Amino acid sequence: MRFENLRVVVTGASRDFGRSLAVGFAHLGAEVFVSARTKEAAARTGEQIVGAARGRIHAFGCDLSRPAEIRELARQVAEHTDRVDLLINNGARWLDGVELESASDEQIVDTIESTAAGTVLMVKHFLPLLRASERPDIINMVSVCGLDSAGSSTAHDAFYAAKSAQAGFADILSRRLGPSGVRVMALYPPDFSTSDPGTREWEGATRSPQEKLTTQALFDCIAFAVDQPRDCFIRSFHFEPR
């Protein structure tokens, strides 16, 4: 299998693209450690898989806005594996609203903490396991909201702020960890269609220039980047909005 024995950690894996990442890598032979705000939500990702890949999904609860839970997640994963080959920072709190006053203080803080601080702390506490790998990669799912040119989204200002912080972190992290062999990549997708590997929607998706970016395309980008020789450092993927 293409990614047999690859050890992968995916945050925000209970739904949408996070779930697709977990299912996709498990089907390709990877051992996948998935987290969501509750263990029950994360476990549902594994329950949807049929066949041998189901046994390659390990579920954990972790609220990314709580540092203690991130530390505990790293500790629990370390009990199952002596290394992590791929960390995918996919988890983030979406906050809608074009008016700054439309969100409560608590919503704003939670959005920034779970998205920006959560990503920083995930990398910090998983670095020992990543450094134990012969092929360590970190993928940050940033979104177009982390770019200066993005202005059409209905996301709240706090979400833009959190994603911009995530983008800046990915950039400096790539510069500082690259010399030690840890590759850091960021993806900046616009809105895209979602489907899970193996489903009718996944297999029959229309992938033409006129259509939205698909989940398959994003997954293929990540799989391609991770599969490159270790002298190939791809720092970011940018996409034309549709």
Image: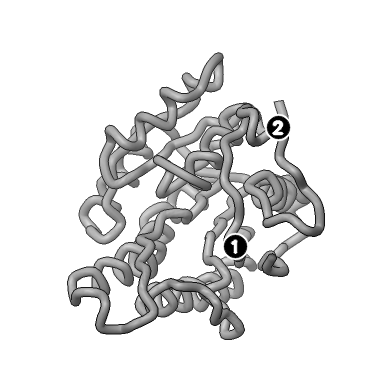
Q: Position of residue 140 (x, y in %)?
A: 53, 61
Dividing the picture into quadrants, the one containing residue 110 is bottom left
Vertically, is 29 above or below 224? above
Quarter the C terminus occupies: bottom right
Dot label at residue 108: none
Left or right: residue 91 versus residue 6 is left
- Amino acid under disc 2: Glu
Viewer-closest of 153 and 53: 153
Quarter the N terminus occupies: top right
| 10 Å crowding of disc 1: few (<14), some (14-19), many (20+) | many
Which residue is identified by label 2? 203
Which of the two marks, 2 or 1, is nearer to us in this view?
A: 2
- Amino acid under disc 1: Val
Dividing the picture into quadrants, the one containing residue 239 is bottom right
Q: Residue at x 71, y 40 (%)?
A: 205
Q: Secondary structure at mark 2?
A: helix
| 10 Å crowding of disc 2: few (<14), some (14-19), many (20+) | few
Which residue is identified by label 1? 184
Q: Position of residue 204 (x, y in %)?
A: 72, 34
Q: CA distance from mark 2 to mark 1?
A: 30 Å
> Given the current orientation, which residue lies at the most extreme right position?
209
> Given the current orientation, which residue lies at the most extreme front position?
210
Left or right: residue 76 versus residue 12 is left
